[in-house]
Image (tube, helix red, strand yellow):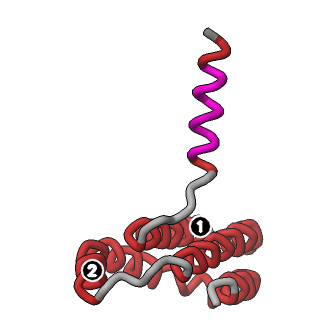
Amino acid sequence: MRRIITMLALGLIISACGGGISTYEEGMNAYADVMEEMVGVLDSVTDKSSAENAAGKIEALGNRLGKITSQLADLPRPDAKEMQELAKNQRARMQDVQQDAAAQMMKVAEYPVLLDAWMRAMENMR
């Protein structure tokens, strides 16, 4: 029994770690997930110490965004109709993320360590 549980757990871990993006929809969802996480990290900043702690998290999230971007670049581009449908499906979520991000971006300007981390994170997306 213990062996079966161990094999099942290993299978779940391997499938979760293999999480390559195979469709544009998966990529857009992954991108939105990371952006929501980034907003959450910024939301946790209340002082210089928490800003320094958040800087590393922002850079790590930037690395994840870079990987998502490169995986999307390797996929065949959806046609215009499919892109419109994907954009339509993501519109409300992305508007919420952008609204939440706008409220938190003042912290990036307030704490130089966050601005540096943000710039490095955005550089990873190129």
Residue at 68 percent of width and 74 percent of height: 63
Q: Position of residue 56 (x, y in %)?
A: 75, 70
Callout 1, which amino acid?
A: Val
Left or right: 101, with 121 as reference point: left
Q: Secondary structure at mark 2?
A: helix
Residue at 76 percent of width and 72 percent of height: 52
Left or right: 87, with 65 as reference point: left
Residue 5: quarter of image: top right
Sequence-first tag of 1 and 2: 1
Q: Nearer the viewer, residue 81 or 38?
A: 81
Q: Position of residue 114 (x, y in %)?
A: 70, 81
Q: Secondary structure at mark 1?
A: helix
The span picked out in magenta is 5-15
Res. 99 mark: none
Q: Which residue is mark 2?
A: 82
In magenta stretch: residue 75: no
Residue at 57 percent of width and 47 percent of height: 16
Res. 41 mark: 1
Q: Position of residue 71 (x, y in %)?
A: 57, 74
Residue at 69 percent of width and 89 percent of height: 123
Where 2 sits versus 9, above or below? above
In magenta stretch: residue 11: yes
The span from disc 1 to disc 2 (Cα, nearest Å) is 32 Å
Residue 13: quarter of image: top right
Where 83 sits versus 47, above or below? below
Residue 3: quarter of image: top right
